[in-house]
Amino acid sequence: MAAVKDTPAGNVVLLSGGIGGAKLALGLDRSLSAGALTVIANIGDDFRHLGLAISPDIDTLVYTLADLVNPDTGWGRRDETWHFMAELARLGGETWFRLGDRDLAMHVERTRRLDAGETLATVTRETCQHLGIGSRIVPASDSRVPTRVVTEAGVLAFQDYFVRRRAGPVVSALRFVGADEARPPATAMAALGDPGLRALLIAPSNPWLSIDPMLAIPDLRAALERARVPRVAVSPIVGGQAIKGPTAKLMAELGLPVNQASIARHYRGLIDGLILDHADAGEAAAVEALGIRAVTTATVMHGLEDRVALARFVLDFADTLRRG
Amino acid sequence: MAAVKDTPAGNVVLLSGGIGGAKLALGLDRSLSAGALTVIANIGDDFRHLGLAISPDIDTLVYTLADLVNPDTGWGRRDETWHFMAELARLGGETWFRLGDRDLAMHVERTRRLDAGETLATVTRETCQHLGIGSRIVPASDSRVPTRVVTEAGVLAFQDYFVRRRAGPVVSALRFVGADEARPPATAMAALGDPGLRALLIAPSNPWLSIDPMLAIPDLRAALERARVPRVAVSPIVGGQAIKGPTAKLMAELGLPVNQASIARHYRGLIDGLILDHADAGEAAAVEALGIRAVTTATVMHGLEDRVALARFVLDFADTLRRG
């Protein structure tokens, strides 16, 4: 990290999973000038279902930034209808993974384009254009890097573990199939190597399920390791609990204390600063003892105001690290 | 055709296209004992669209017999919604062929099963079971026999001609690609060879666009040619007009008089009787001059009562031919 004098302009890269990460992405999108944000999206959850190419985290990011997301769930479409699912059930089809009528357009069109030979990065970029999204959303790779969850119930495909089994089975390890050979899209590498880069951020997503599938891609990990700009993560753990999802349960199963030091240790060498919730102010010292700057703010985002406030706090904190 | 003494029991086979044929199929389904009707369905209109396997005539037959069809259009689903299409348009997808939210379940599930190696006959049979249809609906073949329309605008895929261009271009010929090598499913041949067969019927579908793609399959044509049971067609032309669709326009383009003799000549050697509407009573003699028995009734079906009445008339007429 270079000690370069900086103005608050410049581009920002965010590594993000789905719901929680998308909230911060929205705050950043609304705080930065148009086009300044590049979100690199987790693809470990991607799978083929009913023959359709589903990219849950990309879709959550797209719907959130396009202001189309269901505000009650944080994923899927606002004003969604479920006639397709009802009829699929009647035909004896699989219904454990629910696809809304509006949402289906995304999957059918993406599948058609991927099967015609287009890349996931191209399809995602043009989807963002069609929906008027100013920020860039880039998949971590155009190749498939499916997460496999090693559990007491066997090695499970991610959505089998996460949706069908509701993250119930005890997890002992995670595998990111094909990560060693995967390359990030050129747009991701260009954003990471941008001389005008202001900060490199990690969203408050599940570090093991949502961020690690990206860090398992050698070029992405190397880009974080070598970055000469402030690198800041927002902790997904607040008061010993995950804000949403199975992060705390998973940490316990992996034998990790559910605290901020575990998060900091996980990201050691990849971040310069970690943002904690006020509730965890008492753990800041343990994080700093690992050589990572820790600050506290309100990290639980209830509305757009909270998302923008957290985004501004993250950017300000990153800027202080740059000047430091 | 054998002069065997017959009771009105026995199985019936109907060759059918979409809307008009489905109306007669419904009348037969409601008139015959459960399982006595086998509908062999045109597959010339089938195509892949948005990556999905669409079988328009099978679906119209399925929806009609399951009492799910849109009564206003005669195709598609009753109480349909169109959120998928609206979102697809927003994403820049192709919208000239409209797929409703409920209807989509059929296409997605069929595509998944076909791509997994199941046959169209199996998927269609199990679809009928799921929807409580007592009659059998069997595709004319499990292999693809796509219709190509030779027009002034070039050789067009069927749906390009029929839906996208609204049957506008002048037609000079039709091609049924792969028909020579196609075989009917075993269930179709079993129904045609059934010793208990009562009648072999051709629905009031477009002879060139909906029935010919089936007659181009050698085993189906041979089964009609050799049948030893009454073979009866219902004319799709009433008073020099098609009840629905481009039959009359197409006949004119092919240089054929738009009358009952043209229909009879087209089916010569394949039918023993032709049912005309009362409006065309004056043309019966011309049909009979071709060696085909002609009778008249009300063939335009407005409601279920009309469909059942026509079905009973067709069956009664066939029975008289058997006894004749």
Image (cartoon, coloured by chain):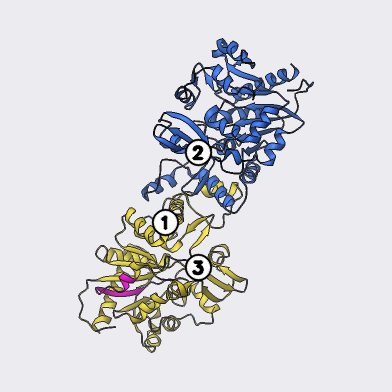
Chain colours: A yellow, B blue
Label 2 crowd (10 A; few <14 / some 14-19 / many >=20): few
| SS assignment at label 3 | loop
Residue B282 sits above or below residue A241 on the image: above
Task: Decide whether residue A246 is among the magenta residues.
Answer: no
Q: Residue B134 lies in what quarter of the image?
A: top right
Do labels 3 and 1 touch, CB within 8 Å?
no
Q: Quadrant of the N terminus of chain B?
A: top right
- Same chain for the residues at labels 3 and 1, yes or no? yes
Spot occupied by residue B282 in the image (x, y as percentages of width and height): 56, 10
A61 and B296: which is toward the camera: B296
Q: Residue B203 lies in what quarter of the image?
A: top right
In the image, which residues are magenta? A189-206
Which residue was labeled with disc 2? B79
The CA span between labels 1 and 2 is 24 Å
Mark 1: amino acid: Asn
Please give left or right for residue B307 compared with residue A134 in the image. right
Spot occupied by residue A76 in the image (x, y as percentages of width and height): 44, 57
A286 and A205: which is toward the camera: A205
Which residue was labeled with disc 3? A146
Q: Residue at x 45, y 59 (%)?
A: A73
Please give left or right for residue A255 compared with residue A40 in the image. right
